[in-house]
Amino acid sequence: EIASKNPLAVTGSKVLITYARDHSTADALDYIGVWNASMLSAAHMGEAFKAKAEKRDGDFPDLLPLRNTPI
């Protein structure tokens, strides 16, 4: 069931849960606000809302793999 949901939202939830575990509530809420404002794709969110309205699973593209680039 989780795999059928918006992949950015699922990934974000995992990141935010991990962050919140190790930080204060205030810091976690600030981080959640920044994450939500910057990381959630309008296309993915639109598909999530459309799929819910049509009572079907969302059809989301796969996320690109993370890259480790030297700084």
Image (cartoon, grey):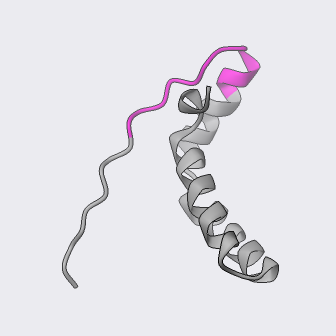
Q: Tell me: residue 57, above or below residue 69.
A: above
Q: Which residue lies furthest to the top in this view?
A: 55
Is 34 placed left or right of 27 in the picture?
Answer: left
At x 72%, y 14%, the residue is: 55
Q: Is the magenta stretch mostly helix, strand or loop?
A: loop
Query: Where is residue 69 drawn, in percent x and y?
Result: 21, 73
Is 31 placed left or right of 69 in the picture?
Answer: right
Question: Is 51 contained in the magenta span?
Answer: yes
Q: Residue furthest right?
A: 26
Is 5 placed left or right of 28 in the picture?
Answer: left
Q: In which quarter of the image is residue 25?
A: bottom right
At x 38%, y 36%, the residue is: 62
Q: Residue furthest left?
A: 70
At x 66%, y 61%, the residue is: 17
At x 60%, y 47%, the residue is: 9
Query: Where is residue 28 drawn, in percent x and y?
Result: 72, 75
Q: Tell me: residue 30, above or below residue 49.
A: below
Quadrant where the N terminus is found in the figure: top right
Residue sitting nearer the eye, 57 or 44: 57
Query: Where is residue 38 drawn, in percent x and y?
Result: 57, 65
Q: Magenta residues, as a range?
A: 50-62
Query: Where is residue 52 drawn, in percent x and y?
Result: 72, 23
Q: Tell me: residue 23, above or below residue 65.
A: below
Residue sitting nearer the eye, 12 or 14: 14
Quadrant where the C terminus is found in the figure: bottom left
Q: How many marks?
A: 0
Question: Is 68 contained in the magenta span?
Answer: no
